[in-house]
């Protein structure tokens, strides 16, 4: 393909941005990154993004014109199809479709986890924790020998789960431990993803403190 210049428009805490950043880093693709304030979205961003959400990927074409991609799945699949580096999807059509289904499952798991993390009352926190742990139990039942979701190779499924697991490395272990208790495959997978260079580099060094500050501003009981 013609050489392009890529700019990732992001927010420092957005897990969907992290998916795209991880894929870019796995592919060793040079890119620029621009963080915006989602509470005061700039006009130029709103003019580009139909949904008003991040991530947004600006792709400068050979003629100098910029194409705009939005939604993390579309961005990640574009990068998979156009950039070099190790493939993040299998060649087999059935296996590829199965991975895409688990990526959708990851988005549902993220919703449960996010509501748990941000809960301002104990009943809500307990309900969302149970829902999230139930999804982890389902993952435990389908995982193979590891260390990644489908074996030895890092895949797109790993790229989308890594930002979700990152939250639980920041929390007090007394909170995280019961959620991952008796889930040895998922726990080993979580640890492997946390050590992956692309996962580490997908966020700024102050990410943990930014996230804790977010919880404090939200009045989350986990911030107490």
Image (cartoon, grey):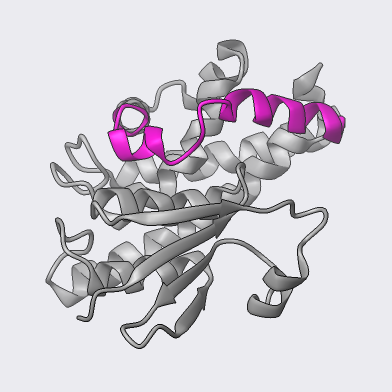
Quarter location, residue 207: top right
Q: Is residue 15 above or below residue 117?
A: below
Residue 21 position within the rendered picture, expressed as x and y whole percent measured from the top left: 41, 51
Q: Is residue 58 left or right of residue 214?
A: left
| 19, 119: nearer the viewer | 19
Q: In the rendered structure, does residue 218 fall within the stretch colored magenta? A: yes
Which image quadrant is residue 137 in?
A: top left
Q: Is residue 49 visible?
A: yes
Q: Which residues are magenta?
A: 192-219
**Going by the picture, which residue comes out furthest to the front?**
64
Magenta segment includes 204? yes
> What residue is rendered at 31% in x and 83% in y?
62
Residue 104 in sight here: no
Residue at left offset 70%, top offset 34%: 117
Residue 156 point in image, percent of width and height:
31, 56
Q: How many marks overall?
A: 0
Q: What residue is at 48 percent from the left and 48 percent from the top?
A: 18
In the picture, the quarter occupied by the N terminus is bottom left
Is 67 or 187 nearer to us in this picture? Answer: 67
Tell me: residue 68, above or below residue 198.
Answer: below
Q: Is residue 50 left or right of residue 72?
A: right
**Looking at the picture, how far across and down is residue 31, in whole percent?**
38, 56
Residue 116's place in the image compared with 181, above or below, is below
Q: From the image, which quarter does the C terminus lie in?
A: top right
- Picture layout, residue 100 above or below residue 122: below
Residue at position x 75%, y 55% from top? 38
Whole-percent x and y of residue 104? Answer: 47, 63
- Prevailing SS of the magenta stretch: helix
């Amino acid at each position: 393909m013609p050489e392009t210049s890529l700019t990732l428009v992001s927010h420092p805490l957005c897990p969907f941005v992290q998916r795209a950043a991880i894929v870019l880093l796995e592919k060793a693709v040079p890119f620029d990154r621009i963080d915006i304030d989602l509470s005061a979205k700039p006009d130029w961003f709103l003019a580009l993004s139909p949904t008003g959400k991040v991530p947004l990927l600006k792709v400068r074409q050979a003629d100098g014109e910029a194409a705009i991609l939005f939604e993390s799945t579309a961005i990640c699949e574009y990068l998979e199809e156009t950039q070099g580096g190790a493939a993040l999807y299998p060649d087999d059509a059935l296996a590829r479709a199965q991975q895409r289904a688990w990526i959708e499952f990851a988005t549902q798991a993220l919703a449960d986890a996010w509501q748990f993390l941000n809960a301002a009352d104990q009943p809500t926190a307990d309900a969302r924790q149970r829902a999230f742990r139930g999804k982890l139990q389902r993952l435990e039942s389908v995982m193979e020998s590891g260390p990644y979701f489908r074996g030895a190779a890092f895949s797109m499924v790993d790229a989308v789960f890594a930002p979700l697991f990152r939250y639980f490395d920041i929390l007090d272990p007394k909170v995280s431990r019961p959620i991952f208790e008796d889930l040895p495959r998922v726990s080993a997978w979580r640890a492997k993803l946390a050590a992956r260079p692309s996962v580490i580099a997908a966020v700024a060094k102050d990410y943990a403190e930014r996230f804790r500050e977010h919880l404090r501003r939200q009045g989350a009981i986990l911030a107490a």
